[in-house]
Every structure is written in C-alpha cells, then in structure tokens.
Amino acid sequence: MNKPLAGIKIIDFTHVQAGPACTQLLAWFGADVIKVERPGSGDVTRTQLRDIPNVDALYFTMLNSNKRSLTLDTKQPEGKAVLEKMIKESDVMVENFGPGALDRMGFTWERIQELNPKMILASVKGFSDGHEYEDLKVYENVAQCAGGAASTTGWWKGDQSGPLVSSAALGDTNTGMHLAIGILTAYIGRQQTGKGQKVAVAMQDAVLNLCRVKMRDQLRLDKMGFLEEYPQYPHESFSDVVPRGGNAGGGGQPGWVLKCKGWETDPNAYIYFTIQGQAWAPICDALGKPEWKTDPLYMTPKARQPHITDIFATIENWLKDKTKFEAVNILRKFDIPCSPVFSMKELLHDKSLRASGSIVEVPHKERGSYWTVGSPIKFSDLKPVITGSPLLGEHTDEVLAELGYNKEQIAAMHASKAV
Ligand code: COA
C-alpha cells in the first residue's frame, strides 16, 4: 500500500483534541508519529469520559490511532535529553500546550532551531501570537465564541435565543486540520529551502476561517442595512451586527429543517430542504404545485422571500405522511438538494459510510474492537488502514532503543521515573 508520508518522523507532543486530530491524520497517511506523554498519567483523554473502567476512553482511542506512545517526563534532565535527541532526529514537532509551556520546559523555538535547523515546529494556541488574549488557555466552546461561530448560530428571539455553540469541533479538530495543511506546506517548503520553520494556528483564527461567509454578511449588512436571505427579512428589523438565523441557509439559497412523518416521537425525523433559484420548477413539480411556477407571488426568489415561512409550512404539510427517507427518495428524482437529518446512531450503522471507510472498526488490545470515524479524505492510491491507539508507554523501550539507548540506560530511566 502506498503511504505518501512514510519516512516523516513526527514528535507528537499534543493532548486533548486539537493537536491529536492533526497528528492522527498524518499518521493515517504514513508518518511515524510518536506520542510523548507524561509518565503515569498520559494524555488526559485516556481517563476522561470512560465507558469501561481502567481502559483507555474512546475520547483517546478515537484521536490517537496509528501512533506509538512514549512516556517521558520532559521536566527531568534525563527526559529533556531524550527529547533533545528526538528533536535532532525528527522532521516535525507538534504541540498544543497552554501558552508558554514549551518555553518553560526549555524548548524555545530558538533552542529547537539550534538542535535541528530543519525542524518544523507546529503549534495550536487559543489566540495568535501577539493577540491581546495570547495568554489565555482555550477549549473548544471558548474558541467557537472567540471566532464568531457562537454569535451567528442559534435563535434570534424566544426563550432559546442567545449565542449557541455547535456540536461539531470547529475549535478543536478544525484547527488540527488547518495545522496539518500548515505542516505539509512547511515540509514542502523545506524541500526547497532546506530550512524548517514554525507553523502556528490559533483556534480563534481557524473558527473565523470557517465563518468567512458570516464576515461577508457583516460587510453586506454594513453597506445595505439588511440581509435578504435571513429569516428576519423583510418583516423584522436588523441591528448593526449579523443576526443569528436559526436554520436558514445563510448562503444564496433559502433552506430550513422541516418535520417529516414521526417527528412527534423521533427527535431526528426531519430533512433539510433548500429552495435554490434554479431548482424552483422541479420543486413545484415534486410538491404537486405546478401552478407556483407561473404565479407572480412564487416565481422569483424576491417574490417568495416575504412568505418563505408559509412556503416551508406547505412543504411540511406535504412531508407529514412521508418518512425522511421516503421524502429524500422522492426529492432526489427532481434533483433537489436535500438530506435526512441523520442521528449519530444512524451514521454509526450506515452501510455506505462503512463501505467507504468513513466509519471503521478498529482493534484495541484492552477494549476489544471499537467503531470509529475513519479518514474523510479519499485517495485513488491510498486506503488508510486505521490501527488501534497505543497503550500508555507501549512503545517507550522500542523508541528509546531506536534512539540508541542500551538496556541498562533504559532500565535506569524507568527507575528514575524519567519515562
Ligand atoms: N512531562 C512533563 N511535563 C509535562 C509533560 C511531560 N511529558 N507534558 C505536559 N507537561 C506540563 C507542561 O509543561 C505544563 O507545565 P507548566 O504549566 O508547569 O509549564 C503542564 O504540563 C500543563 O500543560 P497545559 O498545556 O497548560 O495543560 P492544561 O491542562 O493546564 O491546559 C489546555 C489544557 C488545552 C487548555 C491548554 O493546553 C491549551 O490552552 N492549549 C492550547 C489550545 C488548545 O489546544 N486547546 C484545545 C485542546 S483540545
């Protein structure tokens, strides 16, 4: 099997989600990723949200497959010496410690360059270097609030109004994916210049990058004072900031989450329905409303917008005797962009996702096999084989031996609790 990143050595000094998601992706594609963890405890996610007592939690196993684990106390001199050796022999070091932690450990960017001028140091932080909040530690939902996602998600009126965070890891895994692109870019750059460099992604910036369309809307709002595609238009007033739009598409085509048969008891008996300008005629045909095609009140997006909620209510009426799957099976014949709202349970058992490798079963030494999310990136000449995550320190002796330590030296490091 072709593994394009084979031969790239990565020191994975990451924890929780943002960093591990990045290094896991690189490991899937062939990089040798060595996770450096604190002796005795390791990544905090090994014990967080456990479903089986004394067994690595899914939180850890689902973010650390295809890696090796080395325990190392990098605050002890022997541990520091091992890390220095690793830096000299590796291509990339990835870290997502709190601000300043790596410097306090003695591994400043200047020191790392002294040890290995070809090293690529990749970091995730909450806010970027020099930002007025650069000293803050940041977790997922904090980043969603800092990067604009929360202020533009949710309901704008009623009991449930207020900023809302998404369940998608826009702050964590998304930042890790940005960092992976940065690492590969720096790696290709190194092939041209022979020099390493520091790559950093702030979680705030990565969230903001995904909220680009909301920044677009802010600029349009500044100019026009209203946003035609938001549910507030034309009956409600706009303030000077992009409002939350509920389930509105936020793009060029209005859309909404609509109830299907069984919604009273099934929390996910819904579809997302979009009304795209060019799909209007097929929508009218699918709904059995051919007269809407020529009715001036319905013919154009502008004419429809003032009564768009009534149009969605009519579609919901059409949906009430159809399950979400039956509805989509009808609508797909008319080329209408739509999807069932899938529950996690449905996705976990989805035949297509299992066939494509987007959901995969992985063996684990202690928990047995478990299902996880596989690579969302598909290649014609690479099908990543997802292997189980390592036990804490499973590869400590192996990695130390590869670094040239002999049996006595390794035993001494165990005795001093440096590893
Ligand atoms: N040996 C010795 N010490 C180690 C070690 C090892 N192998 N691994 C970590 N440590 C030490 C660090 O040096 C640090 O020590 P110091 O603060 O005394 O200098 C200490 O462990 C704590 O590290 P820190 O990263 O600050 O952990 P935390 O639990 O306090 O904070 C986060 C967790 C995620 C909030 C923080 O790491 C952070 O803001 N990271 C950047 C943003 C980020 O990635 N957030 C999302 C995570 S999904």
Image (spheres, rainbow, N blue to C red):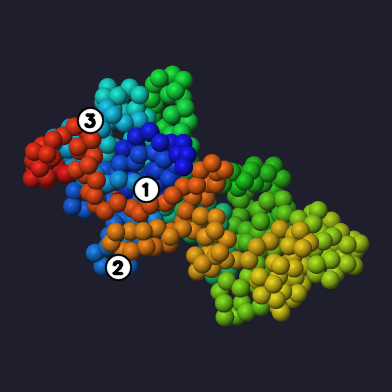
Residue 287 lies, in percent from the top left, at 80, 69
Disc number for residue 207: none
Residue 203 lies, in percent from the top left, at 44, 44
Task: Give above or below for 20 relative to 90.
Answer: below
Task: Please tell me how crowded label 3 is: few (under 14), some (14-19), or many (20+) other residues with Cα within 10 Å.
Answer: some
Task: Judge depth for marks 2 and 1 and give the one in front.
Answer: 1
Question: In this rendering, would 279 be left or right of 136?
Answer: right
Q: Secondary structure at mark 1?
A: loop
Q: Give the CA distance from mark 3 to mark 1.
A: 23 Å
Disc number for residue 52: 2
Q: Residue visible at 51% across and 55% down? A: 358
Q: Secondary structure at mark 3?
A: helix
Q: Is residue 293 visible?
A: yes
Mark found first going from the N terminus, 3 or 1: 1
> Dividing the picture into quarters, in which one does residue 200 lie?
top left
> Dividing the picture into quarters, in which one does residue 415 lie?
top left
Residue 42 lies, in percent from the top left, at 24, 51
Task: Please tell me how crowded label 1 is: few (under 14), some (14-19), or many (20+) other residues with Cα within 10 Å.
Answer: many
Q: Nearer the viewer, residue 255 or 187?
A: 187
Q: Which residue is mark 1?
A: 66
Task: Please tell me how crowded label 2 is: few (under 14), some (14-19), or many (20+) other residues with Cα within 10 Å.
Answer: few
Disc 2 residue type?
Ile
Q: Residue visible at 33% across and 22% down? A: 117
Mark found first going from the N terminus, 2 or 1: 2
Disc number for residue 85: 3
